[in-house]
Amino acid sequence: MTGYIGYLPTADGRPFDPGEKSLSSLKRCLSPLQQEWKEALNRADEQDTFRKEAQAHARTKLLQ
């Protein structure tokens, strides 16, 4: 069995097309893609946490 048929998005939404490769070669291609997704998710979590803290701070200012 070679290649992957389907849709795998990159972290920025572009389609990932590895072409016809062996499964071991595909795994090597996916490793950087997985790291890219982890970094994107961490950035999203940090931004979400920052936004929630800013909103909580703004609420306390309004209540004072």
Image: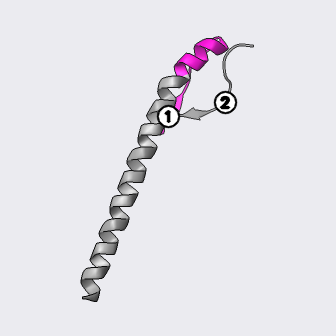
| SS for dot 1 | loop
Numbered label attached to residue 10: 1
Q: CA–CA distance between discs 2 and 1?
A: 13 Å
Q: Which mark is residue 6?
A: 2
Query: Where is residue 11 drawn, in percent x and y?
Result: 47, 38
Against 31, residue 40 (above or below) is below
Instruction: Name the residue located 33 percent from the left edge and 66 percent from the top edge.
Output: 53
Q: Is residue 39 above or below residue 54?
A: above
Q: How many marks?
A: 2
* Region in magenta: 13-29
For label 2, the crowd category at 10 Å Cα-Cα, with few meaning under 14, some 14 to 19 and many 20 or more, is: few
Instruction: Give the percent coordinates (x, y) of residue 21.
Output: 62, 12
> At which x and y percent is residue 5?
68, 25
Q: Secondary structure at mark 2?
A: loop
Question: 32 or 53: which is nearer to us?
Answer: 53
Residue drawn at x 29%, y 88% as measured from the top left: 63
Residue 18 magenta-highlighted: yes
Dot 2 amino acid type: Gly
Q: Is residue 41 left or right of residue 20?
A: left
Q: What residue type is disc 1 on?
A: Thr
Identify the residue at horizontal 38%, vertical 59% (top origin). Answer: 49
Residue drawn 42% across and 45% down?
A: 42
Query: Is residue 49 visible in the rendered structure shown here?
Result: yes
Give the image location of residue 54, x and y in percent.
30, 68
| Quarter of the rendering occupied by the C terminus | bottom left
| Residue 62 or residue 17, whichever sits in front | 62
Whether the magenta-drawn stretch holds residue 15 is answered as yes
